[in-house]
Every structure is written in structure tokens, then in C-alpha cells.
């Protein structure tokens, strides 16, 4: 029986990894709160999941890239007295190019989504979960979190923040009945690359993982309470290899690949 007042909240849930995670939770009869910027996509997801899986889907259209955009999510949840069992901070954007060449204001948008909104939602909902001594938080970072990234400096840096924050609160909350995990996928077959202005060669496209495979791995390992989730053996080898070489060499390799 579905508890109509309990939800899994997913930011960026209308596309890519977020959508695939939403699909898994819907198939498991979990009500959803889907947050995204595109209202048409949100309406499509709501109709699809409610019709196919018989669950309740609340949609919140908001732009997390604007200052305090996350407050709309909190207002809706409080107004409707929803209980959020799982928070999945999946929304994120990137950019491509040297920092000094980026369009003014873009860095603020990236920081607002990737860092500020994620932090404030994590803080707000973790307090609610602590009161119930139950819940889970999955923050989506990237393999980029483990290294410096010339020509994607803000994106790499923001994901390093997400990883560090999530590791810390994993230990802060693990004795309180709350699971906290950080998902660190490598390049994915989603619209992220195009939106960030990244052009992949046909050869490199062969190494992109399917969002559905990443979501399956994330769902499984998150349920187990694993602190850091790295989908795919190639990504695990990448992280291991990066630890074994000098950071200066790592940065040179990334700069060459991004040229």
C-alpha cells in the first residue's frame, strides 16, 4: 500500500540520471516530487508515472540557478506537509572554456545549482530526517570531483565540494538512521555535454555510460548506505589511476583532452 504523504524528492528529475532514478523509484511504488526547470517535461513525467505506476507525483517548476531558487521547493513541501523519505540532489550544470573567457554570471548559476541549492536542501531535509531518525540523501557529484579540471574549472571544483560535503555528513548522520551517499559517475549519455558546450569525438562517445545503468547502480548502492558510489569499472580504474600519478600530470592530461 502506498503512503500518500511520503515522497522521494529528485531535483533535475525530468531528464538523464534523475529521470532514470525517478523511473526506478516509481516502479517500486514510491511517490515522487520531481523538480526541474522545464514545465512541459515535468508535466510529461507526472502523467507517465501516475498512469503507468499508480503513484502520486508532485511537480515543482523552479530555476535553481537563481539566488535562493531552492526556497520554492521548501515552501511547497511545508505547505503540503509532505514527508521526504529520500532526497536526491541530482540537478547540476557545467561550462566549457577558460574561466576568464566565460560569460559573466554563468559561474554564479553553476555555483547556485551545484553548491548552494544542494547544500541548503541537504541541510533542511537532514533536519527533518533526524527528527524521524529515518531517511536518505543522495548527492550527485562526478568523477571530476577527484581532480582539477582545466577548461571546466568551476564544474570540477563544484563537484569536489559535493564529494567532500557528502563524505562528511555521511559520518555525521550514519548513527542516526540516515543514509548519505555521493554518486560519482563519469561521462554519461545525457544532454549535459551539449548544454555545457562540450563536443565529444565519435571515439570518446563509445566510453559514455547509459544513464539507466548508472541509476541502477546508484539505487542499489544507495540502499546499502555506501558513502561513495562510482558506477562502472572503467571509472573506478580512472579514479585509482589518478591517485597514482602526480596531480600536475593529471591536470595536463585533462587539459589536453579538453582542447
Image: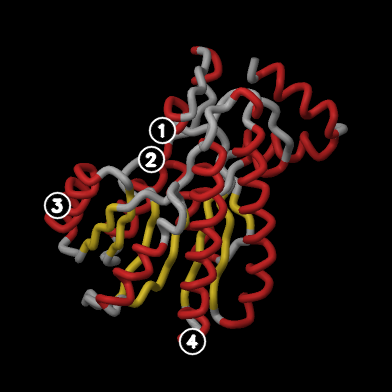
Callout 2–callout 3 Cβ contact below 8 Å: no
Question: Between marks 4 and 1, how big is the CA–CA gap?
Answer: 36 Å
> Which residue is located at x 78 percent, y 22 percent?
252
Upstream in sequence: badge 4 or badge 1:
4
Callout 2–callout 1 Cβ contact below 8 Å: yes
User: Element under label 4?
Assistant: helix
Residue 38 rendering spot, x and y as whole percentages: 27, 43
Residue 203 rendering spot, x and y as whole percentages: 54, 13
171 relative position to 201: left or right: right
Pointer 4: residues within 10 angstroms few (<14), some, or many (20+)?
few
Label 1 sits on residue: 190
Question: Between marks 2 and 1, how big is the CA–CA gap?
Answer: 5 Å
Rendered-image quadrant of the C terminus: top right
> Which residue is located at x 60 percent, y 46 percent?
230
Label 4 sits on residue: 131
Label 3 sits on residue: 47
Question: Residue 187 versus residue 156: which sits nearer the camera?
Answer: 156
Numbered mark located on residue 16 in the image: 2
Amino acid at each position: 500500500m502506498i503512503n500518500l504523504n511520503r515522497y522521494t524528492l529528485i531535483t533535475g528529475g525530468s531528464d538523464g540520471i534523475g529521470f532514470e532514478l525517478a523511473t526506478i523509484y516509481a516502479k517500486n511504488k514510491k511517490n515522487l516530487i520531481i523538480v526541474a526547470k522545464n514545465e512541459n517535461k515535468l508535466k510529461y513525467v507526472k502523467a507517465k508515472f501516475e498512469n503507468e505506476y499508480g503513484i502520486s507525483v508532485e511537480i515543482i517548476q523552479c530555476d535553481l540557478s537563481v539566488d535562493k531558487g531552492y526556497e520554492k521547493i521548501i515552501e511547497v513541501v511545508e505547505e503540503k506537509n509532505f514527508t521526504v523519505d529520500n532526497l536526491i540532489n541530482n540537478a547540476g550544470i557545467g561550462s566549457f572554456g577558460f574561466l576568464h573567457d566565460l560569460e559573466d554570471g554563468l559561474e554564479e548559476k553553476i555555483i547556485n545549482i551545484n553548491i548552494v541549492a544542494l547544500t541548503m536542501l541537504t541541510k533542511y531535509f537532514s533536519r527533518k530526517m533526524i527528527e524521524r531518525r529515518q531517511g536518505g540523501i543522495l548527492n550527485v557529484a562526478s568523477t571530476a570531483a577527484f581532480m582539477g579540471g582545466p577548461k571546466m574549472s568551476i564544474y570540477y571544483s563544484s563537484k569536489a565540494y559535493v564529494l567532500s560535503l557528502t563524505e562528511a555528513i555521511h559520518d555525521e548522520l550514519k548513527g542516526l538512521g540516515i543514509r548519505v551517499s555521493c554518486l560519482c559517475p563519469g561521462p554519461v549519455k545525457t544532454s549535459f555535454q551539449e548544454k555545457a558546450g562540450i563536443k565529444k569525438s565519435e571515439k570518446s562517445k563509445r566510453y559514455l555510460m547509459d544513464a539507466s545503468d548508472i541509476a541502477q547502480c546508484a539505487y542499489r548502492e544507495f540502499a546499502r548506505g555506501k558513502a561513495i558510489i562510482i558506477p562502472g569499472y572503467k571509472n573506478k580504474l580512472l579514479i585509482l589511476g589518478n591517485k597514482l600519478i602526480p596531480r600536475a600530470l593529471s591536470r595536463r592530461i585533462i587539459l589536453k583532452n579538453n582542447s
